[in-house]
Amino acid sequence: MSETIKKIGVLTSGGDSPGMNAAIRSVVRTCAYHNIECAGIYRGFQGMIEGDFKEMGPRSVNNIVNKGGTILKSARSKEFMTPEGRKKAHDNLKNAGIDALVIIGGDGSFTGGLVFNKEFNFPIMGIPGTIDNDIFGTSHTLGFDTALNTVVEAIDKIRDTASSHNRLFFVEVMGRDAGHIALNAGIGAGAEDILIPEENLGLDRLVESLHKSKASGKSSSIVVVAEGDRIGKNVFELGDYVEENMPEYDVRVSVLGHMQRGGSPSCFDRVLASRLGVKAVESLLEGKSNFMAGLINDKVELTPLEQAVKGHSEIDRELLRVSEIVSI
């Protein structure tokens, strides 16, 4: 174990996701287990610049494993993008006796951590927290599983209305650049079509597919749309186009929005957060830096942070094939 690390700082940055609190808890208690001090850094990198730190022990993270969001808060920090801001942050960490950082967040947070490490040779370890599941080096990011369950539950309720009124519902889910939520939740909720940024179906093919569904005896349909899908300018324009071309359908649009980012984390996310927190702290104590702890083939592995940021999280082609078969 590293003799140089006596205190570890933990922060959450970027968008919140269910499971972040479970990860904070794991980091704090792993530090306590190894007789290392731990400091919570409030409001991400902005809190580092302002010295917004709080000593944390095993009892200060009681009863948070089941809570969504993040008790450490999260904020964007323009000041951290400047050398002056990062210098201020480094001075504050040093004055507080903090020797290493665990950053729970997405690729933007990891990029900030890499720059900080390069400038000050400050040990950094990342834990992937984003519902979009779009980070390379892990099969699951914190919050992804919870978001899927939230979306499937919402679509199940929407389907009750769709089937009662012979309606066609377009349900927009989060996923600006990645269709992981749409694809998995679409299969789980039995959607007739799934539109994702990675696959441009095209308006005509979508209408053709819906005509086929209608002809096969389906009286209502659910189409799950990732917010980054490129078919139309937005999901409402998409709905208008289909209504014009398929007047037999009563078309409705439902945007699930930020409800997908909230809520109590699933058991899977709580266990994953606990595993990643332990790995992050123990890796720092082993003298490792600039890695992200992630899940690969159900084992917790380290991926270089730079690779996690630059690598591309591919959509599962087998799942695409499955979605085509089961939506017939």
Image (cartoon, rainbow, N blue to C red):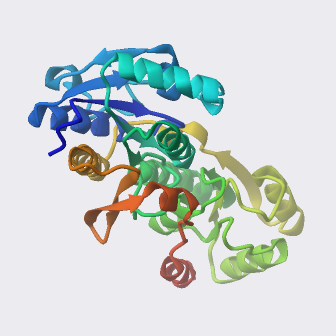
What residue do we see at 72% from left, 74% from top? 210
Find residue 61 and report its image quarter: top left
Q: Nearer the viewer, residue 35 or 2?
A: 2
Q: How many marks?
A: 0
Q: Is residue 244 above or below residue 3?
A: below
Quadrant of the rendering where the C terminus is positioned: bottom right
Residue 204 left/right relative to 282:
right
Residue 77: in sight, yes or no? no
Most extreme residue toward the right is 244
Q: Is residue 26 above or below residue 233?
A: above
Find residue 270 and report its image quarter: top left
What residue do we see at 65% from left, 52% from top? 172
Residue 137 left/right relative to 38:
right
x and y, in percent, of residue 208 in the image = 78, 80
Q: Is residue 3 above or below residue 76?
A: below
What residue do we see at 32% from left, 16% from top? 54
Residue 69 left/right relative to 285:
right
x and y, in percent, of residue 161 in the image = 58, 51
x and y, in percent, of residue 215 in the image = 70, 82
Q: Is residue 234 above or below residue 72?
A: below
x and y, in percent, of residue 183 in the image = 54, 66
What residue do we see at 60% from left, 50% from top? 174
Q: Nearer the viewer, residue 148 or 144?
A: 144
Residue 170: in sight, yes or no? yes
